[in-house]
Image (cartoon, grey):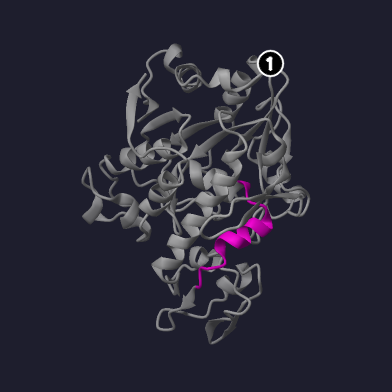
Amino acid sequence: MSDVYFVDLRADRESKNVPNKIAKLFKAAGFAETFKKGELVAIKSHFGEPGSHTFLRPQFCAKVVDLVAKTGAKPFLTDSNTLYRGGRSNAVDHLTSASRHGFIPPVVNAPMVIADGLTGKDQVEIEVNLKNCKKVMVGSAAHYADSIICVSHVKGHMMTGFGGAMKNLGMGFGSRAGKLDMHHDVGPSVKEEECVGCGLCAKNCPADAIVVRGKARIDQGKCIGCGECVVTCYHDAIDPGPESSYSTAQEKIVEYCYGIIKEKRGKLAYLSFIVDFTPLCDCPSWSDHPVIPDVGIIASKDIVSIDQASADLVNAQIGLEGTKLGRKHLAAGTDKLRALNDVDWTVQLRYAEELGLGSRDYRLVRI
């Protein structure tokens, strides 16, 4: 059983503000001993797609930077490029988007490094020899960093049910080829009775796999399974595909985590923010209304425990009215993650535990 340290967001004095609570978590979880003087420490986060606004505030990451720097290590902020079209599919656009969202000095006193380089091809292949992947392809910054602290914004996700530390680390550090590898089993299709032929899905498809002739048509031979059409369709006219394909995608994400973690045992730490919990991830170019009140921040050295605790804390909340949850799933204890995207989110946790990445049993320690 692993310890997961928790702070809520109540504050009535300076000592209880968010930066000071992050510092208390950092100390309680023993993160300082993870980082050594002179080490290059990758702070893996998500800088938000242009048009969204519920990504993690740069001030939160700034405090993590300061705490890592205090150990004598050398922190840098990082993420990999995206597979889909948008504001983060190459390093130039990615860095520009991050800057416009406030990830710049003096807000955050650390350099930005795009983990898989200018066009997403700067990658390292790691042998894992697991069920779905024989090798995983990750951004070189993830591989060559001495240590990693995974700073995650917990939120819903159409493919994994929710996005936490494993989604942030595995999918997030996958190179563009790695992301394609994790997505390609997913095969969306058009629900013709719902499609209005607006063309938005075709405009956003990175593989040019969609044409609109009255109704949208998806060329499955070209489709890369990224799910961008599902996310961007306003009319719920894209069927995301069978749940079995999403289960495989979740397992692949875990296998990518396995590849990253196996070479850095004892050199990883996880900090997750359960705030602005939206139905989808931070990758669409908009942000829906959060479906639960802000919960708090949690920290652990166990990637499985921190994600299980995240899911449990979300589902324990009373849902907010007037959100995507609807009235049926507002009660505390209902499975809000399943209700939002109809995905069995436990697949990733069960498989990660099976691979020895951590434990679903945990002790929540309130700070």
Name the quadrant containing residue 67.
Answer: top right
The residue positioned 49% from the left and 68% from the top of the image is 233
Residue 316 spot, x, y in % from top left: 26, 40
| Viewer-side residue, 351 vs 189 | 351
Q: In the current view of this chain or complex, which residue is farthest to the bottom?
A: 213
Q: Tell me which segment is drawn in magenta.
A: 173-187
Residue at 28 percent across and 40 percent down: it is 317
Q: Quadrant of the N terminus?
A: top left
State whether the magenta stretch is mostly helix, strand or loop.
helix
Residue 171 horizontal/vertical position (percent)? 57, 51
Mark 1 = which residue? 72
Q: Does residue 176 belong to the magenta stretch?
A: yes
Asked if residue 89 lies left or right of residue 238, the reply is right
Residue 10 appears in the figure: yes
Q: Is residue 57 visible?
A: no
Task: Give the camera-side residue of 8 and 69.
Answer: 69
Q: Secondary structure at mark 1?
A: loop
Q: Residue at x 35, y 47 (%)?
A: 291
Establish if 211 lies above or below 263: below
**Snapshot quadrant of residue 359:** top left
Quarter of the image that includes the C terminus? top left
Residue at position x 64%, y 35% from top?
102
Counting every numbered tag in the picture gives: 1
Height in image: 284 above or below 67?
A: below
Residues 2 and 245: in front is 2
293 displayed left or right of 238: left
The crowding category of the residue bearing disc 1, from other C-alpha atoms within 10 Å (few below 14, some 14 to 19, many at least 20), is some
**In the shown orientation, is residue 172 left or right of residue 97?**
left
Q: Is residue 70 magenta?
A: no
For badge 1, the amino acid type reads Gly
x, y percent for residue 58: 59, 32
